Image (tube, grey):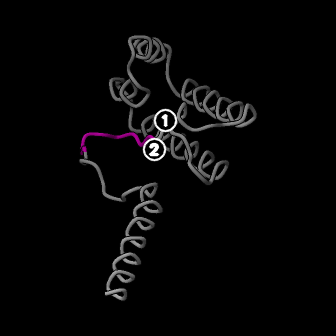
Amino acid sequence: MIIKFSKFLCLLTYIVLLFCFTSGIAIASPDTINSKSHFIVAQSTQSSSDVELSPLQRQRIQGLRQRRNREIRAILNSAQREKLAKELHQGAKLNQALEKLNLQPEQRELIQAILKFTNLKLKFMFPKKTPAI
């Protein structure tokens, strides 16, 4: 009887520990795939406001975003810049606003490259718990 109880207690402890350690691990299952999406934007289970960052880390993220925005603005013409600003002011996210612009294939490829490069920089700058841009 004591052996069964100790086995049960050991099994119960194992299950509780397993649950505690795996609750923070992200599940690697893809969300619904949107075939119309042309832009890749990093996604995270935690928003940047949920992650505790030092002021220096926040400043680095802000610098990355500002550089990304400058590079994107340099690719767009004045009408596209105005439309992008209007969409962002109305509350659209960057990738949604870029989708609404009439971009030439060259512009689309350059912007995709900028977004990928920015996300890679962010990933290597903060290898653990990277916030989304």
Q: Residues within 10 Å of mark 2 (few under 14, many from 20)?
A: few
SS at circle 2: loop
**Residue found at x 47% / y 62%:** 21
SS at circle 1: loop
Q: How many marks?
A: 2
Residues shaded magenta: 34-44
Q: Amino acid at mark 1?
A: Ser
Q: Amino acid at mark 2?
A: Ser
**Looking at the rendering, which quadrant does residue 91 occupy?**
top left
**Predominant SS along the magenta part:** loop
* Residue designated by label 1: 47
Q: Residues within 10 Å of mark 1 (few under 14, many from 20)?
A: few
> In the image, is residue 69 part of the stretch drawn in magenta?
no
* Residue designated by label 2: 44
**Residue found at x 70% / y 37%:** 57
Q: Which mark is residue 92?
A: none
Rounded to the nearest whole Å, what is the CA distance between mark 2 and mark 1? Answer: 7 Å
- In the picture provided, is 78 more to the left or to the right than 103? right
